[in-house]
Structures are given as structure tokens and as C-alpha cells.
Amino acid sequence: GAVVSQHPSRVICKSGTSVKIECRSLDFQATTMFWYRQFPKKSLMLMATSNEGSKATYEQGVEKDKFLINHASLTLSTLTVTSAHPEDSSFYICSATRPNEEQYFGPGTRLTVT
Amino acid sequence: DAKTTQPPSMDCAEGRAANLPCNHSTISGNEYVYWYRQIHSQGPQYIIHGLKNNETNEMASLIITEDRKSSTLILPHATLRDTAVYYCIVRGRSNDYKLSFGAGTTVTVRA
């Protein structure tokens, strides 16, 4: 299957700082990328859908000014958690897809805000 | 997208087949059944998908009932590395490729 990477795999930051997470499709061009978050022992929750070259579409209840998403190329999307707080600590997972194909997921990024 | 119902957990013995049920009684004609799994602290992994016919690949088999209201994922020879949460998801093949993850089934393979 296709390969999707995320960087960093884990990050610890102080409250009030911003953190950027990268998602790359390594062997294909992804027209659409998705960002999910997952709290311990919970299922994945979709945060936003990102299409290359256009603004991301956020799910209800997700603050677009807090979770900035950029999809500047067909192989890279970034999620920036701005002014992070301890409640933003979570497992963030991206996925990438192209038309009529499955979603391929990255390995996830564990964010801890202290 | 149609909602799915899965048992919260199941155990199976290493080397035996694992049969994971999924109910999707409100599935519509153009919706596919997808299966993903998530091993602890990793991103989900695509397993298989199908529309009407049974499907098989190197990982698993997918059996869909004739009325399409339920399906079964079969792991033919479960190994300890198959221990994971398995998600059954129903969605269309439109330009909106969103996946809605439910609680899934926690499968524990025991030696």
C-alpha cells in the first residue's frame, strides 16, 4: 500500500506555544488529506479535510483558527496547533488519498502540552 | 454514511481463523464496506473493502451478505501481531472520502 509519513512522531511543548505537524505522502500524489485526533481509549475523530491548493474544510466544533491546516503541495500537508493548551494533548493522525482510492494513514504524532 | 455496529471485543486463538462481524442494516446501494485496523499507538491500516461480492486479499477475506445488511471480516490464520482494534466503516465512493470511525472491535489474539 501507499506510504504516508508524519513528523515529528512525538512532541512535548509548553502551554501557549505553537506546534507544527507535517504529513507527507511518500510515493503518490494525494489530492486530499485528512487530519484526525484520537484521545486515549477513544476512536479517531475527523478534524478537517484538506484539498491541495484550497482552504481546509473543518468539522463542526473544530476551531479553524486554532488548528491551522496548509496543503501547499500534492505531497505535503501541515497542521499547526496554535497556542497549545494541555487539553490539546492528543494523538494526531493524518491520512492521504487520491480519487477512487483508499485512505492511507500516517503513523501518528503524539502531542503532549505541559 | 450508514452506521455500523460491531461487538466491542473478542478473543481468538493464535493460528485459528478470526471472524469479525459487522452490522450495517441501513447501508445504501452505492455504499461500500471498508475495514481498517489500528494496532496500539499506530495509525490505522487499510485491510479490505467491498460492495456486493466477497473479496479476498493477502490480509483477509470479506464476506458480505446478499442483502448487504451485514458482513464478516475473516483473518484466516490469526497471529499475535493481528491484535488490534478493527473498524468496519460504510461509505460512498463520492468525492467526499470521509471515514467515520466507530468504536470498533478490540481483537486480542492469544497464544
Image (spheres, grey):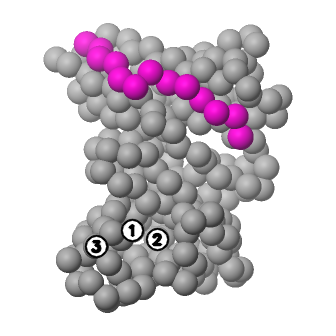
Marks 1/2 in contact by CB < 8 Å: the verdict is yes
Give percent across and percent down for residue A5.
41, 65
Q: Chain of mark 2?
A: A
Tag 3, which secondary structure? Answer: helix
Q: A26 or B51, which is in the foreground?
A: B51
Disc sitting over residue A23 in the figure:
2
Tell which tag, 3 or 1, sits nearer the viewer: 3
Q: Chain of mark 1?
A: A
Circle nearer the N terminus (3, 1): 1
Marks 3/2 in contact by CB < 8 Å: the verdict is no
Residue on which the image places disc 3: A86
Q: Which image quadrant for residue B95?
A: bottom right
Q: In the image, which residues are magenta?
A: B1-13
Give percent across and percent down for residue B104.
45, 33
Q: Three-letter amino acid code at disc 1?
A: Gln
Q: Which image quadrant for residue A16?
A: bottom left
Give percent across and percent down for residue A42.
38, 46
Disc sitting over residue A20 in the figure:
none
User: Which quarter shows the C terminus of chain A?
Assistant: bottom left
Q: Is residue B85 left or right of residue B28?
A: left
Circle nearer the N terminus (3, 2): 2
Task: Please say whether residue B17 is visible from this viewpoint.
Answer: yes
